[in-house]
């Protein structure tokens, strides 16, 4: 979140002006009709790769309740940001700025406002021009080797905006917008024209409290609807499940097949059902080589033989650690084969006795995504009674400590509320001063830190810490604990469920993977809330808002559909006793 994306230079209304009055942590849900004329190619709006949830979280508002402080998700959010700004005067001249619209930049807006005395409808006639934002020193460092502008948009247009504000209820009841666009998008969002007439009509449907009484029922239904989509698409001969051994192309077909199996098992589809039996048989027939695919095959097997209610028992303290699995011989043999192959895939460019990290295949090189997946797979293998060895976890811990980015800015207070306290309504944790340190795809100098990779770092550190707990104290314990907290401090500083947090050019990448990564990082350490951010509730409400009547989450592909369901199901088991 950024402090103030909209700055007004016109006079505002006096003290009695309207304020948003959403419930603490609540959400306003809107129905919306939107269209661009002429129709865009393929029916897809240019520069809008993210799912479009027409909702407003209370956490996205300024503490005063007067306006939105979250960055726009894309250019479709220009009108909502303006319509939701209750500082805008009801009459007279307006001069304003909307900052950092992805693919465009800063929008300088000028025009007039008028209010119909009979209806109370406020009308704004505005013109706008795009300007390139100035990056600060740290942002220039984050840009790394890519010299392209982060925004790079050009052009302008006009906007007629009408809104109805219910000042008593403290909500914007409705708004309509009509844009005349003559814009060019920047290099990270299509680098092409955005021209024509764009219309929006939003109407308030409901206001929901945080975790209201129907929340879990809505989530449960969404999980079952999503699972129907996935089960229908579980055909072992699907092209994306194909095995393609190549040193340069890493399609990970077996990994996609295994992810589909894991997801349906998490959704409580029976492992002895014909579809899953056939899928497992196909998985066992494959020669799996790639790190990601090996790891997810191990996770699918672990999901198949996990005891019922294991997560609940862990959170209630009935059991202290995940329970060792009892596997049939054919599954145990595959787990042994896959885990040994995973160990052979460690980066041979460093001494694995001191630093363990992974890439797609055996050889030299690594990335933090494959490395975290390898550790998930090895932890699952250890639950299946494979002896992974203390040295592997120590060397992997050393890797994660070596790739965490330097701290940016001063230390900040961080409160990690345990899952058990969140569910029970208790509050015993207290904030502690912590520096924010994220993770990127590889080394800190090769690219910026961003959300999904920071979660990968937290997950990798947590898996190492959880595995090492079985071996007694180690010299790394305090370092790992500190690094985990610093990763959570980075998430606290960049929190959003609308995009993958980080520099604007990266925010539209891997959205569903980001949510799944956030769930795993928090669940491993039993973190129910980061400061006042109820990450699960916001992520779930957003997914519910974009799920269609067939059960699909917007335009999610099969892999993304799985990530969304696994997030909703909270399928990741804790491995630590609680926030460190």
Image: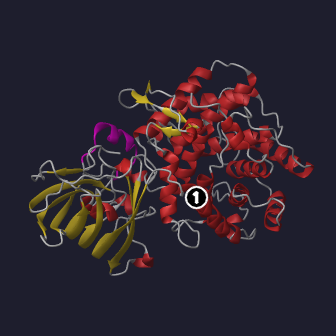
In the image, is 251 to the left or to the right of 67?
right
| Residue at 66% from the left image edge and 49% from the top image edge | 571
Vertical relation: 183 (above or below) 347:
below
| Residue at 43% from the left image edge and 73% from the top image edge | 44
The answer to whether residue 441 of the structure is visible from this angle is no
Q: Choose top left, top right, bottom left or bottom right for residue 561.
A: bottom right
The answer to whether residue 190 of the structure is visible from this angle is yes
Q: Choose top left, top right, bottom left or bottom right for residue 359.
A: top right
Vertical relation: 291 (above or below) 236:
above
**Residue carrying label 1:** 219
Q: How is the image coloured?
A: secondary structure
Vertical relation: 431 (above or below) 68:
above
The furthest residue to the right: 329
- Give, as a single range, the part of the protein colored magenta: 134-148
- Quarter holding the C terminus? top right
Along the viewing direction, whichever of 514 and 46 lies nearer the viewer: 514
Q: Choose top left, top right, bottom left or bottom right for residue 495.
A: top left
The furthest residue to the bottom: 38
Element assignment for label 1: helix
Along the viewing direction, whichever of 555 and 154 lies nearer the viewer: 555
Q: Position of residue 253 (x, y in %)?
A: 69, 61
The question of residue 143 being in magenta is answered with: yes
The question of residue 147 being in magenta is answered with: yes
Along the viewing direction, whichever of 19 and 97 lies nearer the viewer: 19
| Residue at 60% from the left image edge and 44% from the top image edge | 520
| Majority secondary structure of magenta residues | loop
Vertical relation: 426 (above or below) 39:
above
């Amino acid at each position: 979140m950024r402090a103030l994306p909209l700055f007004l230079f016109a006079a505002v209304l006096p003290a009695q002006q309207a304020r948003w009055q959403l419930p603490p942590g609540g959400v306003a849900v809107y129905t919306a009709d939107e269209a661009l004329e002429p129709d865009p190619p393929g029916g897809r709006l240019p520069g809008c790769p993210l799912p479009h949830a027409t909702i407003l979280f209370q956490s996205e508002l300024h503490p005063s309740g007067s306006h939105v402080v979250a960055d726009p998700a894309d250019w479709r959010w220009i009108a909502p940001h303006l319509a939701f700004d209750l500082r805008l005067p009801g009459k007279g001249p307006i001069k304003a700025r909307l900052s950092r619209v992805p693919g465009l930049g800063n929008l300088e807006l000028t025009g007039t406002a008028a209010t119909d005395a009979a209806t109370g409808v406020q009308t704004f006639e505005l013109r706008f021009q795009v300007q390139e934002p100035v990056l600060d020193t740290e942002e220039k460092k984050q840009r790394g080797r890519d010299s392209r502008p982060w925004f790079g948009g050009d052009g302008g247009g006009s906007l007629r905006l009408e809104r109805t504000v219910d000042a008593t209820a403290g909500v914007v009841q409705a708004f309509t917008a009509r844009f005349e666009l003559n814009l060019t998008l920047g290099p990270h969002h299509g680098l092409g024209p955005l021209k024509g007439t764009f219309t929006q009509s939003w109407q308030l449907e409901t206001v929901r409290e945080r975790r209201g009484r129907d929340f879990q029922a809505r989530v449960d239904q969404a999980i079952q609807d999503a699972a129907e989509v996935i089960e229908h698409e579980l055909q072992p001969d699907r092209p994306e499940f194909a095995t393609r051994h190549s040193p340069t192309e890493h399609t990970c077909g077996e990994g996609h097949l295994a992810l589909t199996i894991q997801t349906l098992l998490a959704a409580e589809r029976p492992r002895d059902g014909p579809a899953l039996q056939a899928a497992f048989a196909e998985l066992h027939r494959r020669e799996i080589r790639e790190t990601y695919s090996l790891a997810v095959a191990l996770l699918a097997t672990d999901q198949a033989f996990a005891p019922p209610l294991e997560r609940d028992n862990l959170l209630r303290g009935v059991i202290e650690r995940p329970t060792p699995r009892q596997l049939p011989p054919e599954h145990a043999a595959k787990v042994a084969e896959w885990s040994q192959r995973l160990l052979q895939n460690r980066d041979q460019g460093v001494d694995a006795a001191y630093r363990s990290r992974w890439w797609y295949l055996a050889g030299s090189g690594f990335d933090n995504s494959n490395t975290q997946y390898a550790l998930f797979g090895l932890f699952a293998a250890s639950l299946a009674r494979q002896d992974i060895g203390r040295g592997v976890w120590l060397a992997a811990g050393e890797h994660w400590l070596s790739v965490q980015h330097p701290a940016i800015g001063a230390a900040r207070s961080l409160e990690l509320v345990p899952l058990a306290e969140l569910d029970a309504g208790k509050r015993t944790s207290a904030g502690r001063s912590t520096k924010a340190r994220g993770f990127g795809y590889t080394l800190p100098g090769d690219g910026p830190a961003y959300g999904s990779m920071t979660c990968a770092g937290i997950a990798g550190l947590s898996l190492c810490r959880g595995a090492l707990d079985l071996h007694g104290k180690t010299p790394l314990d305090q370092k790992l604990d500190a690094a985990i907290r610093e990763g959570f401090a980075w998430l606290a500083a960049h929190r959003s469920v609308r995009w993958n947090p980080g520099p604007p050019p990266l925010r539209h990448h891997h959205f569903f993977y980001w949510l799944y990564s956030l769930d795993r990082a928090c669940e491993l350490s039993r973190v129910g809330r980061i400061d006042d951010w109820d990450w699960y509730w916001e992520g779930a409400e957003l997914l519910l808002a974009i799920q269609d009547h067939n059960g699909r989450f917007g335009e999610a592909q099969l892999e993304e559909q799985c990530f969304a369901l696994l997030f909703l199901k909270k399928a990741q088991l804790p491995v630590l006793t609680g926030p460190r």
